[in-house]
Amino acid sequence: MKLKPFHASFVARKIALELLKSGVSFNAVEMQIYEEIERVLASDMAKEKALEARVNELLDEREEEIEASGADKRSLFSMMKKQLAAKFDFEMDVEERYENVAFLVFEALKKGEFVAFSVSENRVKNVIFEAILSYINGFESAENAACRVLEKKGVKFGTSEWEVMFGRIYEDELRRLGLN
């Protein structure tokens, strides 16, 4: 599942919450920790966005050939993304990607002296990794539930009312699922 910039703050809070539960103590204000975690997540997301932009450029350059051959553009996008991933220092395997992100979050928190560890460093990295995967596994469920509620209420998708209500309901669903 692909994380979007919208998810960064939620993932950051999930990671911080899980770190606190695991015995890590904070040497900084929670907001600073959230911001540092979000910075690392945003950097990873920016790599993926740049990679996808390049793939789209290449597909656009060959659009006539693709249409003439009847090739599936989605399949080509996926294949090209895999081929170019290394050039963008982007890991395509979800577990390996988020294992690397967990390591980067750990290193950033350690370097900035944002946290103090009373458990092993390996345990802290695992807590971060598990928090990311837990969020990924649950956020789709929260999004679907929020959409169902809004549809039942007759709120039109894409309106400002939708955006405001979606954010509130989404956060409530994440809390209900223990992800926020």
Image (cartoon, rainbow, N blue to C red):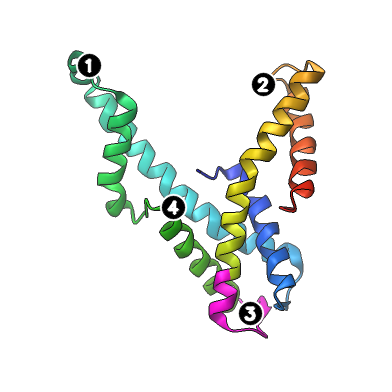
Pick whichever of labels 4 and 1 is earlier in the sequence. 1
| Residue under label 4 | 94
Label 4 to label 3, Cα distance in Å? 28 Å
Dot 2: within a 10 Å radius of its alpha carbon, few (fewer than 14), some, or many (20 or more) residues? few
**Dot 4: what SS?**
helix
Dot 4: within a 10 Å radius of its alpha carbon, few (fewer than 14), some, or many (20 or more) residues? few
For badge 1, the amino acid type reads Gly
For badge 2, the amino acid type reads Gly
Comparing labels 1 and 2, the label whose residue is closer to the camera:
1
Pick whichever of labels 4 and 3 is earlier in the sequence. 4
**Dot 2: what SS?**
loop
For residue 99, above or below residue 26: above
Comparing labels 1 and 3, the label whose residue is closer to the camera:
1
Of 160 and 85, nearer the camera is 85
Label 1 to label 3, Cα distance in Å? 55 Å
**Which of the 4 image quadrants contains residue 50?**
top left
For residue 43, above or below residue 166: below
Image coordinates of residue 172 in percent, x first then y, are: 80, 42
Label 4 to label 1, Cα distance in Å? 30 Å
| Residue under label 1 | 70
Q: Is residue 123 magenta?
A: yes
Label 3 to label 2, Cα distance in Å? 41 Å
| Residue under label 3 | 113
What residue lies at 67% left-to-right and 21% top-to-bottom? Answer: 158
Badges 4 and 3: C-beta atoms under 8 Å apart?
no
Q: Which residues are magenta?
A: 112-126
Of 178 and 40, nearer the camera is 178
